[in-house]
Each structure stands twice: as C-alpha cells, then as structure tokens.
Image (spheres, helix red, strand yellow):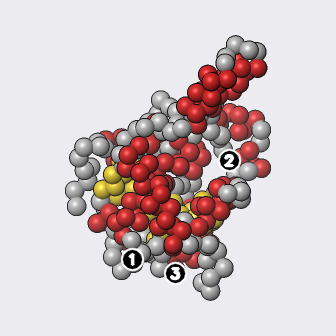
Amino acid sequence: MTPDGLDERFDPRFFHRAARVVSPLVHGWFRYRLRGLDRLPSGVPALLVGNHSAWGTAEILCFLVAWAETLGESRRVNGLMHDAMLATPLVGAFYRRIGAIPATSDSGRAALSAGHDVLAFPGGDIDSCRPFYEPRKVRFGARRGYVRLALEAGVPVCPIATIGSHYTWLMAPGGGLIARTLGFPKRLRAHTIPLPLGWLAIVCAIAMFAMHLLPWWGLMTVVVAGLAPNPVRITSEMLPPIDLRAATAHLEGDAAKVEHGHALVYGALADAVARMEHTRPYASS
C-alpha cells in the first residue's frame, strides 16, 4: 500500500521484461498496431476506457507492449481488474506486477491521484464473453462507475477502440444463462462465463479419447489448437480525449451528468468499433 492509498505491486523492471518477452507474439501472431497514442493528454493523468473481447487477454497484452515500447518509463498505467482474476494464483501475481489493481472506485481514484493513467474496461465479462457472431458490438450494460470516476477525479477520458481481438478465441453463446442459473452475478459479480469453442472441442476430444475413438496424438492436437489463440490481426486506436466535467457542466444532478457522460464515451467507442479499419485511422487528430 502506497502513502496515497494505492494498493499496487507494480514492478517496472518486470513490466518491461514481460513486454519484451511477449513482443514477438504481439507483433508476429497478432500483427498489433496502436494508433492515436499521441492524443494522450500531456501533464495530466487520463482514464483510458476500452472495449473488451475474447477474455480480454490479447488486447491487454498488446496494449501494454505498445505502451512500454512507445512511452517507456515516462508514464505509468494501472489497469483495473476483477478481484477474482487478481486472486487467481500465478495469473493474478503476473498482472499485479505489470500494473493491475482492483477494479474499485477507490483504487482508480488512488491511481489517478498518484499521477498514473488508469486503464478500464467497463464491459468486463459481459463484453469480453460476447458470442463469436458479435465482433463489432460493445456491451457496457448498466455499468457507469467509470463515468463517476472521471467526473470525481476531473480527468479526461480517452476511449480506446479495438478490433480483431474478438476472434482470438471464438465464444459460444449461452454463458449469461449459465452464470445466472448458477447464481454467479450475486456470488462472484460475474454476469456471464466464457464458453470458448476451442475448449468445448477439447472436452469432446477427451470424451472420444476415453471411448478409444481418438488416438493420443489426435487428442494432443485438439488440446493445443483449442488452447492457442487464433493468429488474428488486432488494431487499437486511441480516440480524441473527452472532458466529461466540461461536457456535463450544463446539466443539473449527478444522475443526468453520469448518463450524459456515458452516452458521449460509449457512443464514441461503439461507433469507432463498428466502423474502424485495420488499414487506416478512424479519427482525425
């Protein structure tokens, strides 16, 4: 815990070493490109708000590698992450060391107060577990905490639109129904669960292997193919920053400010995801 109340275990040396290790995957397997980073406001921290796809793993790693390679140690970014992920052995420790902090308003305010940029994916599970046939959708649901955080902290919001990552793991529909049936929304704050088709193929392959219908090498082939992300092209673009305090100053009441702020950020992000192309910038500087 830092003096300003920020509970982080960020290790800058580990962060940059991890970026170098993951870089070949990011640039070779995903052919990642981050555009518009020059729009990041200078001299003040910003709240970076992005869309999520296919567990969110690929776009997070891609973004952090590009951040490290472009900005070096000139700026630090803390990513808000679900406490269930942070509590997962090895995975949680890894993400904490590269800058992840609990996805709470207190953690976000502490990071911004410390002068760090904060990366948030308000859609979380409902956005990242969208079925494979919704590649250009953005789902935030009723989540507005990111708007309240930006208004309270008085920081600009920089939407980050990403396309392509939805295809890294293809998700089957039905995760929301299963989560509700098992009571996950109340017990785990999870409104859906991932159903990657590759993992469903692994389950089927294991069943076939158990019935002696599939040789061991066939099973291993299915397992490797099911676990590995698809080699897709991923592109992110940071859109022009939005000053939510200025944009909502004419409104009375916190609820009205929050909803209007959400409409501005979500609208910009959803429109960009729907119309972006890998080959040319979406927004003009």
Which type of secondary structure does the marked residue at label 3 adopt? loop
Name the residue tied to disc 1: 74
Amino acid at pointer 2: Ala
Upstream in sequence: badge 2 or badge 1:
1
Name the residue tied to disc 2: 190
Q: Name the side, left or right, on which 165 lies relative to 242.
A: right
Which type of secondary structure does the marked residue at label 2 adopt? loop
Q: How many marks?
A: 3
Q: CA distance from mark 2 to mark 1?
A: 35 Å
The numbered disc on residue 218 is none
Amino acid at pointer 3: Ala
Q: Nearer the viewer, residue 146 or 251?
A: 146
Name the residue tied to disc 3: 114
Q: Is residue 169 above or below residue 238?
A: above
Upstream in sequence: badge 2 or badge 3:
3
Amino acid at pointer 1: Ser
Badge nearest the viewer, 1 or 3: 1
Q: Residue at x 42, y 70 (%)?
A: 46
Q: Nearer the viewer, residue 89 or 18?
A: 18
